[in-house]
Structure formats: C-alpha cells, structure tokens
Amino acid sequence: MVSKVLYRPFEETDFDSIATILQDCWHTNENSEVYNFLEACDDLAYCLSVSTFSQVALVDDAPRGIVLARTGQPDPTWTQRWNEASRDFFTQMRTIDKDALARYEQFISLTGNIDKDLLRTSGIDGSSEITLLAVDHNTQGLGIGSVLLDAAADHIASQGYTQAFLYTDTDCDWKFYERRGLRRAAAHRATRDERKFVPREMYLYRLRLSD
C-alpha cells in the first residue's frame, strides 16, 4: 500500500505526535516513560520558541516528521507561548523525578556552552539556523527527511541568506547531512565528565545556499 504524504506548516494539534517522535529518537534515558515524554515535550517547545519557519510531514494524515528553522528573531508572542509551555513541562518533570530533571538541566547547560563554542569556531554569523529535523523511524525510506530539509533551505534562501547551519551529534544520523551536501564546520569531542550528559561528539554543519 502506497502512503499519502503531504506537507504543511506546524499546527498545535501536531504537538504530541511530534513530541513522541522526539522521545523515540533522543529521550529514552530515564526509567519513567511519562518523564521521558515530558522531556521531549520541553525539547520541542524550546525548538518552537526560537523558530520562525515550520514544515510538518503528514503520512496518511498523521504527523510523522518536522523541520524548524530560524531567520532573524521569532515573534515575541510566539516565543512567550512556548516558553510558558516549557516552564509547565519543567514543573511536571520536577514532580516526577527531580534527579532526572537535574541531569536534563546539566545536559541543556553543557549543550548550550558547547554549541556556542562550535558556532564561534565555525565563523558562521548564526542568523540562519535549521533548529530541528526529526522523522519517525517507521516512515524512513519515503524521502521525508530530504523534502523537509529542502523546504527549510528554500525558506532560508528566500529570506536573502546565502548559508544555513545546524547542530547535530553522534546520537543522530549525521551522515544524512553529508549526503545532502552539508559540510562539517566545527566539532567537539566530549570529555569523560561531559560524556555523562552529552553525546560522544557534537558537530556544526554548514549548508551553502548559493555560490
């Protein structure tokens, strides 16, 4: 049976389905699945809060992939909406498992610092970023990731930018980006202490949008 694949901007009714995809990809470390889901929800809320563009892949009418991107500053009302959601997720996570939340906060802090170093090392100005790309493992092979990445690149180019960048790491399919023409511009290998919280290696990739 051939699946029907459609693409449209993110709608709030997509949130739980997309958060479940993020949970399956990156938020599986803790014993409580409820906690893991809330962690994924916070991850998605943050990505939404800093993004100005979205595209969701619907497979047979169900959200199965998403790309988010940022050019310039997002609308303050939009950012506030998702920051408030993030605070609510943190409150729920703290109620379920304070120790797990502490580990997550350490991950956020370390990742933020490492990402800043990667951006500085790369020499990229940081104004045009692909902030999230995630696809349901069950729909791989349909070309969804490539279509979503192209949609983000086309949008960023339409805003007058000549390049974009994204962060990825060894917990992700970073080779996909190289197959799609992105090039590694900076890398960080985690120390022994950092490895308790972050992936073994973290990368910044550059996508040139014009010669």
Image (spheres, rainbow, N blue to C red):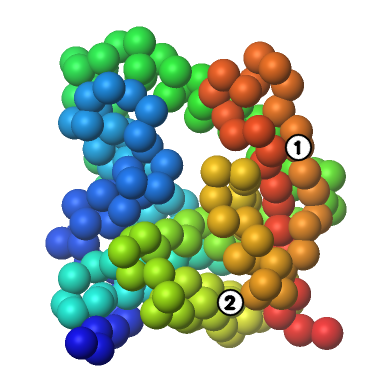
Residue 103 vs residue 209, the one in the foreground: 103
Classify residue 176 by image quadrant. Answer: bottom right
Q: Is any atom of residue 44 visible in this view?
A: no
Q: Secondary structure at mark 2?
A: helix
Mark identifier at residue 149: none
The residue at the point 51 percent across, 20 percent down is: 106
Residue 24 location (% of width, % of height): 33, 46
Label 2 environment density (alpha carbons within 10 Å; few <14, some 14–19, many ≥20): many
Q: Is residue 195 left or right of residue 136?
A: right
Q: Is residue 135 left or right of residue 176?
A: left
The residue to which callout 2 is attached is 153
Please state which amino acid type lies under the numbered disc 2. Answer: Ala
Label 1 environment density (alpha carbons within 10 Å; few <14, some 14–19, many ≥20): some
The residue at the point 80 percent across, 55 percent down is: 185
Quarter of the image with the N terminus in it: bottom left
| Label 1 vs 2, first from the N-terminus | 2
Mark identifier at residue 188: 1
Q: Secondary structure at mark 1?
A: strand
Please state which amino acid type lies under the numbered disc 1. Answer: His
